Image (cartoon, rainbow, N blue to C red):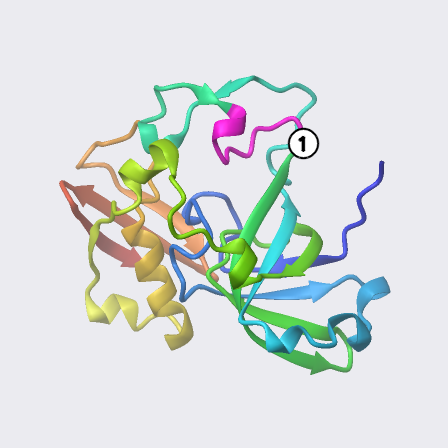
């Protein structure tokens, strides 16, 4: 079986560190989806503008490996507790497929890149290959009463973010809220809780450095 890459996403995250662990958690994060030349027909997205959200099926391109394990260590459980791989959304799977629901902000029709999908809330690294795009159907895809397993215990977890305005103003305005929302999700590995340690990740062409003490994340540099 061969899966064809139909598009790639362009996001603020050139590396894995700092990316929200689920789509929609940082709902202001902007990204754009650019189709591969073979799929740049405006006809292929006819009617898509009528939907507010779409599903993305994509490749964990940085997690491709020849072997797999039946258990993984979810970061939200501190990185020390093992759960069955099919009870998690870990990238380390028999097939490295990701599934994300994102908001479709608008469709831009361009001369050189064809229809470009501008989306919000994506949890994908820059240049991630996308295999398919499907419309999100609220009447079929939403299950408000569903149970979330061990993830329910962490669904309301967030940090209070302190970022001096003089640092935040280094960023273009359209990137600021998405950064704050991403930081609030606590980008640190689950097993690292050193309050003196300075962490950093690349975001939208900038380097963001921060530290965490208790429930407060303090941004110390945006360069």
Q: In this view, does 122 lie to the left or right of 191?
A: right
Closer to us: 209 or 187: 187
- What main secondary structure does the magenta stretch of the protein show? loop
Residue at the image point whose x is 33% and y is 70% from the top? 170
Residue 73 percent location from the top left of the image = 42, 23
Q: Where is residue 162 in the image (x, y as percent from the top left)?
A: 18, 58
Q: In which quarter of the image is the C terminus?
A: bottom left
Quadrant position of residue 194: top left
Q: Which residue is found at the position 41% from the left and 29% from the top?
A: 74
Horizontal and vertical percent for residue 190? 32, 31
Does 209 lie within the magenta span?
no
Examine the rendering and report whether any part of residue 210 can be seen: yes
Vertical comparison of 53 with 87: above or below: below
Report helix, strand or loop for mark 1. loop
* In the image, residue 95 above or below residue 60: above
Between 119 and 173, the residue placed more toward the observer is 119
Q: Quadrant of residue 165?
A: bottom left
Left or right relative to 79: residue 132 = right
For label 1, the crowd category at 10 Å Cα-Cα, with few meaning under 14, some 14 to 19 and many 20 or more, is some
**Disc 1 designates what residue?**
95
Q: Which of 151 and 65 is in front in this view?
A: 151
Q: Which of 198 and 144 is in front in this view?
A: 144
Look at 68% across and 58% down and name the residue there. 133
Task: Please give the range of residues in magenta.
Answer: 85-95
Please tell me in which quadrant of the rendered image residue 195 appears.
top left
24 relative position to 176: left or right: right
Image quadrant where one finds the N terminus:
top right
- Decide if residue 205 is on the left or right side of residue 151: right
**Location of residue 169 in the rendering, given as x and y in whole percent from the top left corner:** 30, 73
The residue sitting at 52% across, 62% down in the picture is 138
Say if residue 189 shows up in the picture: no
């Amino acid at each position: 079986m061969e899966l064809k890459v139909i598009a790639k996403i362009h996001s603020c995250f050139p590396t894995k560190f700092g990316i929200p662990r689920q789509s929609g958690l940082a709902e202001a994060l902007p990204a754009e989806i650019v189709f591969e030349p073979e799929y740049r027909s405006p006809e292929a997205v006819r009617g898509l503008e009528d939907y507010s959200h779409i599903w993305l099926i994509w490749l964990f391109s940085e997690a491709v490996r020849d072997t797999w394990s039946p258990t993984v260590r979810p970061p939200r459980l501190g990185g020390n507790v093992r759960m069955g791989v099919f009870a998690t959304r870990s990238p380390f799977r028999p097939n490295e497929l990701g599934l994300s629901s994102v908001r479709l902000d608008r469709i831009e029709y361009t001369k050189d890149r064809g229809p470009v999908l501008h989306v919000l809330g994506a949890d994908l690294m820059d240049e991630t290959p996308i295999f398919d795009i499907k419309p999100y159907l609220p009447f079929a895809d939403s299950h408000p009463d569903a149970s979330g397993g061990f993830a329910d215990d962490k669904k309301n977890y967030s940090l209070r973010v302190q970022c001096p305005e003089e640092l935040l103003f280094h960023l273009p305005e359209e990137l600021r809220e998405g950064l704050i929302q991403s930081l609030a999700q606590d980008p640190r590995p689950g097993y690292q809780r050193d309050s003196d340690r300075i962490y950093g990740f690349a975001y939208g062409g900038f380097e963001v450095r921060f530290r965490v003490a208790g429930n407060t994340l303090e941004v110390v540099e945006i360069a």
